[in-house]
Amino acid sequence: MRLLGPASEEEMIAVFLRGELDSGRYGKKLRTLLARDRRTEDLLRRPDLGDVEANAYRRRLLEEHRAYERRDGLFGGFPQQVEWFRAALERDEVLDILYIDWDWWLELSGGTRRPRDAARRILEDEGADATAAEHEPLAAALQTTPPPPELIAVTTTARTPLVLVEGHARLTAYALFPDYLPAKLEILLGVSDEMPRWCQF
């Protein structure tokens, strides 16, 4: 893993929301909130990180959508102070990122939180309510322009383990179809020695 340079919390928020906009589970809610506020999807798909008002709106949106500011739900116990970076990971490092400690991802991976185990169980049809075919377009999108949103992961200064914050379906797809992965994949990485307090770590 190589750190490429610093990133901002505003960038992480923008990438998180862009990823959830395309989610079958969360996208509808986000589009409803955008429509209510008379905002377009461009605010999430093509964010201008130099626009202070737009950054503030996205932060409010993530708070309403996922209780980010309150540090509740998915973000329960998430540190207030996190250093954000862009990082380049090799294929094996990408597939070593752990899922969050969430029932669905525990079930899918057989309790290990490892994407490779989830992929094996899906391919062997071990009771997982997921198919390889539905995931392949997510992996193939790595070769499109623009590419899909970056995965967002977090860790401590020891840089192990890496735990995913956003991008679980995409990471599962990459484990199912690793040939689509480039030699190095750029992600957003949050670092804090308080990260073990996060409820999903």
Image (spheres, helix red, strand yellow):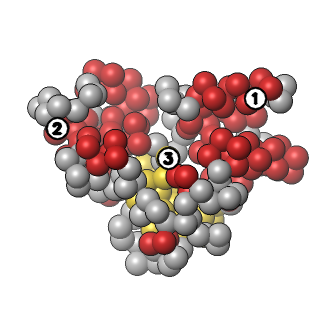
Q: Mark 1, residues whose alpha carbon is within 10 Å: few (<14), some, or many (≥20)?
A: some
| Tag 3 near tag 2, CB within 8 Å | no
What kind of residue is marked 1? Leu
Q: Earlier in the sequence, mark 3 or mark 2?
A: 2
What kind of residue is marked 3? Glu
Residue 188, x across and y down, in percent: 54, 55
- Residue at 38% x, 23% y: name it: 137
Left or right: residue 132 versus residue 72 is: left
How far apart marks 1 and 2 lie (CA) works out to: 37 Å
Closer to us: 120 or 188: 120
| SS for dot 3 | strand
Disc 1 or disc 3, which is closer to the eye? 1
Q: Mark 3, residues whose alpha carbon is within 10 Å: few (<14), some, or many (≥20)?
A: many
What kind of residue is marked 2? Arg
Q: Mark 2, residues whose alpha carbon is within 10 Å: few (<14), some, or many (≥20)?
A: some
Query: In the rendering, which numbered label is found on residue 34?
Result: 1
Residue 29, x across and y down, in percent: 63, 29
Query: In the rendering, which numbered label is found on residue 166?
Result: 3
- Which quarter of the figure is the N terminus placed in? bottom left
Q: Which residue is mark 2?
A: 121
- Residue at 22% x, 39% y: name it: 119
Left or right: residue 28 versus residue 134 is: right
Q: How many marks?
A: 3
Q: Earlier in the sequence, mark 1 or mark 2?
A: 1
Closer to us: 152 or 127: 127
- Residue at 77% x, 23% y: name it: 35
Left or right: residue 45 versus residue 35 is: left
- Which quarter of the figure is the C terminus placed in? bottom left
How far apart marks 1 and 3 lie (CA) works out to: 20 Å
Extreme residue toward the top, this view: 133
